[in-house]
Image (cartoon, grey):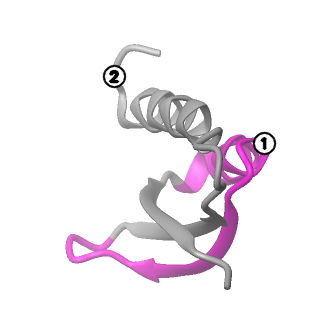
Amino acid sequence: MTTWEYVTTPLLIHNTAAILNNWGKQGWELVQVVQGPEGGLVAYFKRPVTQDGSNETGLAAAAQAARQFDGGAA
């Protein structure tokens, strides 16, 4: 049985493709985009969890990508 991990991230309207491509490069599949509680867009992603834990490197890269688009240090 496949086990999934999930992540959410805000989508900036002017940079949507770059944000989605960054997450896709890390193996994340877009599941849904919804309006967030403050009116912005929020993207929900999923990807399978690996048995060997190799996704942990991807999680760190995904966190870095999220900081980049949230205005934090890249």
| Residue closest to the eye, 22 or 40 | 22
Q: Is residue 44 visible?
A: no
Question: Among all residues in the image, which is located at the extreme top?
Answer: 73
Q: Where does the magenta region start and end?
A: 13-39
In primary-sequence order, the first of circles 2 and 1 is: 1
C-beta proximity under 8 Å, tags 2 and 1: no
Residue kind at label 2, given as amino acid type: Gly
Q: Where is mark 2, residue-wise?
A: 72
- Element under disc 1: helix
Which quarter of the figure has residue 35? bottom left
| Residue 73 drawn at (x, y percent) | 38, 14
Q: Is residue 29 visible?
A: yes
Q: Residue 34: say if magenta.
A: yes
Q: Where is mark 1, residue-wise?
A: 25
User: As drawn, is 71 to the left or to the right of 49?
Assistant: left
| Residue 68 drawn at (x, y percent) | 47, 27
**Vertical side of 63 occupied by 74: above or below:** above
**Vertical side of 72 occupied by 46: above or below:** below
